[in-house]
Image: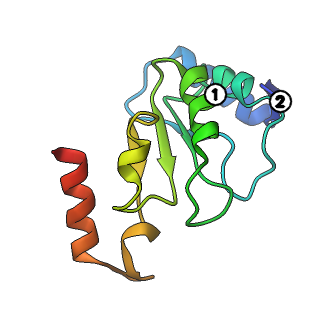
Amino acid sequence: AQIGDATVGSDMARLLLKRSSVPHPFVLFGGVAYKLQPPPEHLDLTVANATRFVDVIVTSGDEVGIPPSFEKMRIIREAAGQHPVAIAGGLTPDNIEDYLPYADCFMVATGIYRSFHHFDPAKVRAIGHLLTD
């Protein structure tokens, strides 16, 4: 099945179509133009179509730890309309405020790490203050 210019398998398409027509007790996050994947040729169309199948559009920069471009986020925000958008990756206390106009949810990990298994408490507090003030 085609979602924009992205193809999903027939089993996944059936599941997504069923999910979109039945109330459900969970939130389905769906990756669009996600890191380490080939970018869709028509990002706006892909995002607009994905809003029919997932509760939250999730995107990222092109690589781990790299934030998405502002142009990419402008296209996604515009195409998603009022549909929730999340950014996963590349966000730090130094740049997250710049992304507030583009997303409703932020998935932050590497940007607040001290090491792979330990968060930096100061960075966690800094992000928390930026998002709650």
| Percent position of residue 36, x then y | 73, 59
The x and y percentages for residue 70 are 57, 42
Q: Which residue type does callout 2 highlight?
A: Asp
Q: Residue furthest left?
A: 133
Q: Are marks 1 and 2 in contact (CB under 8 Å)?
A: no
Q: Residues within 10 Å of mark 1 (few under 14, many from 20)?
A: some
Q: Residue 5 got which mark?
A: 2
- Where residue 103 appears, as percent x and y from the top left, is 44, 36
Q: Residue at x 64, y 28 (%)?
A: 16
Mark identifier at residue 16: 1
Left or right, 14 with respect to 58, comes to right
Left or right: 108 in relation to 133: right
The residue sitting at 27% across, 58% down in the picture is: 127
Structural crowding at the residue carrying mark 2, measured as other residues with C-alpha within 10 Å and reported as few (<14), some (14–19) or many (≥20): some
Disc 1 residue type? Leu
100 or 37: nearer the viewer: 100
The image quarter containing residue 54 is: top right
Q: Residue at x 41, y 56 (%)?
A: 95
Residue placed most toward the observer, 85 or 75: 75
Residue 125, picture quadrant: bottom left
Quadrant for the N terminus, please.
top right
The correct choice, above or below, for 43 with respect to 51 in the image is below
Q: Earlier in the sequence, mark 1 or mark 2?
A: 2
Q: Is residue 75 above or below residue 35?
A: above
- Tell me how many marks there are: 2
